[in-house]
Image (cartoon, grey):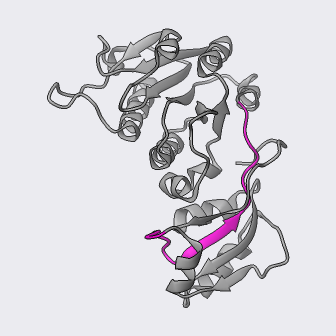
Amino acid sequence: MARSGRKTSGTAVWLYGRHAVTAALRNPGRRWRRLVVLPGREEEAAALVAGARAVKHGDEAAIAVRDHNGFAALLPRHAVHQGLAVEVEPLAAPDLDDVLRGIASVSGQFLIVVLDQLSDPQNIGAVLRSAAAFGAIAVAVPARGAPPVTEALAKAASGAVESVPLIRVVNLARALDRLKGAGFWICGLHESAPRLLAELDIGGRIAIVLGSEGSGIRRLVRERCDFLARLPTRPVQPSLNVSNAAAIALYELTRLRSR
């Protein structure tokens, strides 16, 4: 997904694994520097470069071949790289207003995922992957406390960082007010909510809010929710990993809205 013209921040990072690398090179909003592959993967690398829509930046050769030791010097320890890694520059930072302007004159159903107090990059990456799979238009996180788009986050997202904007907002409660003003219903997911998510009749624009596994949704954020709902988990294990809960909630909302 091409992003707005806002400035990027931070230095170049390595994305690794087939899905993340392929998605980055197909994204016209990306700038990339070099693609590194294991010996024997040169033909695959050439095909990826030939089909790239991302913008090549810098004077380095487009493709470099490295052995396993060479990969180990570039990537985090135990990175599952599948013989592919690409050095990229950060995407332009998306903004909530950018997303809302994009749908201002469009009718139909839209989903946004809001994450409160999540700090694990792999959880956020997994939520991005589910958001892409079920058609959410953005994932919003607090600007303070949420991790940057690291290699681990991008790997867990499996390419979704290229298609789903990860929005950082200064004040999450005010961002929910902004979403309400744009016609969104706000639904908080809480394990002790009196109603199941499947029982709610929510149409149109929906923002689903999930909190951290420890403390859940903060009070001020919860008070902004129009609805609170829970998943049909059993009392012996009422809570789920937040990325699993997000995937189930997105599936349920997609199923309900398609009926």
In this view, 103 is above or below 71: above
In this view, 219 is above or below 243: above
Position of 167 compared to 97: left or right?
left
Q: Is residue 87 magenta?
A: yes
Question: Residue at horizontal 71%, vertical 26%?
Answer: 100
Q: Nearer the viewer, residue 52 or 32?
A: 32
Could you tell me if residue 127 is visible in this image? yes
Residue 256 picture quarter? top left
Q: How many marks?
A: 0
Q: Is residue 85 magenta?
A: yes
Question: Residue at horizontal 58%, vertical 33%?
Answer: 141
Where does residue 82 sit, x and y in percent of width and height?
Answer: 48, 74
In this view, 98 is above or below 153: above
Question: Residue at horizontal 84%, vertical 43%?
Answer: 5
Where does residue 185 sit, x and y in percent of width and height?
Answer: 54, 14
Position of 99 compared to 248: left or right?
right
Could you tell me if residue 258 is visible in this image? no
- Specify the farthest residue to the bottom: 40
Question: Residue at horizontal 65%, vertical 41%?
Answer: 165
- Specify the farthest residue to the left: 236
Position of 34 compared to 199: left or right?
right
Where does residue 160 sit, x and y in percent of width and height?
Answer: 57, 50
Task: Provide the major secondary structure of the magenta segment.
Answer: loop
* Residue range corresponding to the magenta coloring: 77-95
The C terminus lies in quadrant: top left
In this view, 18 is above or below 248: below
Where does residue 149 sit, x and y in percent of width and height?
Answer: 61, 50
